[in-house]
Every structure is written in structure tokens, then in C-alpha cells.
Image (cartoon, coloured by chain):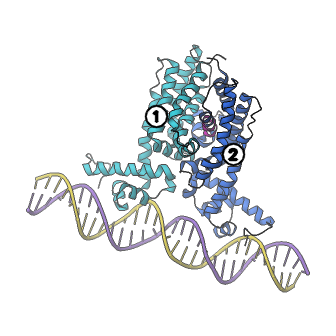
Chain colours: A cyan, B blue, C yellow, D purple
Amino acid sequence: MPKAAQKTDTRIQKKNQSAILAAGLVVFSQFGFRGSTLDQVADEAGLSKPNLLYYFRSKDAIYTALLAKLLENWLEPLRKIDPEGDPVEELLGYAKRKLAMSQNFPRESRLFANEIIQGAPRIGDVLSGELRELVDEIAVIINGWIAAGRINTVDPHHLIFSIWAQTQHYADFDVQVRAILGKTDPFDGAEHHLETMLRRMLTSTT
Amino acid sequence: MPKAAQKTDTRIQKKNQSAILAAGLVVFSQFGFRGSTLDQVADEAGLSKPNLLYYFRSKDAIYTALLAKLLENWLEPLRKIDPEGDPVEELLGYAKRKLAMSQNFPRESRLFANEIIQGAPRIGDVLSGELRELVDEIAVIINGWIAAGRINTVDPHHLIFSIWAQTQHYADFDVQVRAILGKTDPFDGAEHHLETMLRRMLTSTT
DNA sequence: CTTGCCTTTGACCAGTTGGTCAAAATTTTA
DNA sequence: TAAAATTTTGACCAACTGGTCAAAGGCAAG
């Protein structure tokens, strides 16, 4: 049995564990935790249901592992904002990184969205703990830039929400966006629009 | 039996039908269609499960009725944009109306979000039909305003996505927003931020 | 108050759910 | 290659799922 106490992962374990997580991502991101079944995940992974449960204690364990892995990558781009850099380029860079994540990892975005919409029962403490602290730090940096007259006055928290909302929208509401744009690729226009909006927001002299 | 063919709804029917829809909204908006159970809806409505099914043919029928009702209200604010009005005030008014909907009807917003994230299996045709046409009409109006030099150049479709994303974010990601803001009411700052952002976007002279 | 309709319910059903287990199959190790 | 360890599976289970149905309970009009 592959237990937590175990030191080495065999190659079969590594292969199957990542196959299960990949399958779980596909299924959970579409139907949410409660709307997904182990059979769906097993099918997607190409394994039998008991075999799944040989690698993960329970449905919940798969989902939790997925969420934990996701949260690392989720917070990382925020940390890359450099207080010493150029304010506009730093914020623009952050927005572009988030947009790229929506483009390249839409399922991760939807998994996260599902979890939050359903009340964030498993990551509520991360939100009000680690995430909040991180956002508050960035808010201090932004306020510093504002005080120094390097960007326009703006509420830092709501600015961050703006960036999150606009970038994640293209992953989470992908179906709607594509239904409206037709054959046009959403991400073609999205990056330019986002850049325009942020530049005008931060540096306009109306 | 209350059938479609029936002409008059009794008092009791009206009361229970709306109680069921209200309960369905609470449950479905939190767990999505597949993640919700009839027992949950029945409990929330204060009725027995067979009693639910006396008023609605199936779980699907409750959900579909809810979605249909929602879609009316959802498209309405867009229609109120007046081509003859002041461009900035029209777009600002639209954004404020959407933000107010997030504040006053967050569950409706989350129900819609759940449906879209899960691939919009029941309203895909509305999105690529009615909604798309409506958005395209507004896009023509906005392009007219741009051509007349009354607002800055901007991609109309992405501008609309921006407004949707930023306003719905406060309903759909309510838990996250509140976790980060603490005791501060999100909607206090949100409206001001949205107005600032849109005004700078549309009228800045950088 | 009683007849006829509307409403509610308890018992029930077949299919699905997350999860267990011992045994079989396979891979690794010595 | 044989023993030991790991991996896979089929059979199974109790709880839950959406949904049915006949019978009982309530309600309004005559």
C-alpha cells in the first residue's frame, strides 16, 4: 500500500498518481466536487475504481490534493510583483501572467472557481490567511506607488479584484465568451484590451 | 394534478411553486445541478420530496424553470442601453445596474456562473443566439460612439466582457472578496472603483 | 355535512454512489 | 528463477439518488 509514511514512489505510483490527478482535474473542474463521481474520474484516468482508491484514500483525498497543488501556482504570480520595478510594468506583467494562466490552464481556473462559488469550504482559511496577507502586502506596495505619484489614485484591493475578474473570466466563462465572439480567438483581443484598460486606469491625465 | 394545460393556479399552487423555486435557487446556486439533490431542495422548501414532484415533473424541470426565469432578467439591463444617450453615462449606468444585480441577487449570479462553468449544456443556444445578437447590437452602438469621437477607441466586445467580469466577480467570488477585505463591505468600494476605471478607460487623454 | 377535487404522504423501487476486501496478477528484488 | 512486495481486479455492501404510486388527508361548494 502506498502510505504517507512511505519514502520512495515507484515509477508505477508516480505515473498513476499523476494520471489520477490529471483525470480528477478534468472531471472536478467541470462538475465540481459533489457533481463528480469516482467512476468518471476512474474512466478518465483509464483505471478501475478500486484501483483509484489504492492510490488515494478517498474521493475527497483526490480533490484536496488537486486543490493544494493548485493553490501553490495560484499565489505565485502575485509574489513576483517587484516593489522596485516600474509600477505600470509590474502590474501589467502580473495581469498578463494571470491571463496566460487562464489561457494555458483553464481547467485549474475553473476548479478554483467552482470551489469558491460553492463557498470555499476547504480553502476558506487559506483565503483569509495566506492570500489575504499576500494581497495586503501588494496593497501596501501599490499605495506606495500612488503616494509617490507614480500611478493614479486607485483602491489597491479593488484593482487586484479587477485584474483577477477580467483574466479569469476568459477561462471560467470560456463557453460564453466563445459563443459571443464566434470564430475569433478570445485571447487575441483580450491581452490588448487588458493592457489598454490598465494603462489608461493607471496613467491617464483626465 | 397541476398540468401545463391547466388554466388557473390555485393559491396553494402559487405559494408552493414559488417556495420550490426559491429553495431550488439556494441549493442549485451553491452546488450546481449535479451536486444538488431533491432532498436538499425539499428540505429547504419545507416540503416532502414526493410533494416537490407533485409540482414539478423532475429535478431537471425545477432547474430549467429557474434558468429560464433568470435569463429574462439577465439580458434586460443590456437592452436598456440607449444609443441616443451620453456614451459614458450609458455604459456607466449599465455597469452600475449589473453591479447592483450582483449585490441584490448574488445567488442568481452564482447559478448562472455554475451553469456556464460547467459548459452551459442547457443554455448554449441562448448564448450563441439571443445573447450574441444582443451583444453584437450593442457593439455596433459602441463602435458608432467611437467613430464619432465621443469615447476612446476600445474593443466593444472585450469592454462588455470587462464589465461582466468585474461586476459578477463580487457575487460569484463573494467568499474570496470578503475574506480579503475583512469587515469592509465590498460594494462600498466596488462602485467607485468601477466608475473610476470606466471613466478613465473611455475618456482619458493619455 | 358530504361530495368531489386538490394536496400530501409513507412505502417502495431500481440505479448509482463512495468505499471495502480477499484474491489474483504483475513487478521487483535477491 | 523464486520469493517478496506491489499492483490490479471482481464481487460486494450500505447509503443515497431521482422518481412512482396508491392511499390518506384537507378543502371548498352545494
**Is B163 in the magenta?**
yes
| Relative height, residue A110 to residue B19 (above, below) | above
Q: Is residue A186 visible?
A: yes
| x, y percent for residue A25 | 43, 48
Quadrant where the C terminus of chain A is found in the figure: top right
Element assignment for label 1:
helix
Q: Residues within 10 Å of mark 1 (few under 14, many from 20)?
A: some
Residue range in magenta is B161-169
Where does the image place residue B98, in percent across and percent down from the top left?
Answer: 69, 39
- Mark 2, secondary structure of its residue: helix
Q: Label 1 is placed on what type of residue?
A: Ala
Look at label 2 and name its amino acid.
Leu
Relative to A202, D26 lies left or right: right
Gap between marks 2 and 1 measured at Cα: 30 Å
Residue A140's place in the image compared with A163, above or below, is above
Q: Which mark is residue B75?
A: 2
Would you say the magenta stretch is mainly helix, strand or loop? helix
Residue C1: x %, y % from top left: 87, 85
* Quadrant including the N terminus of chain A: bottom left
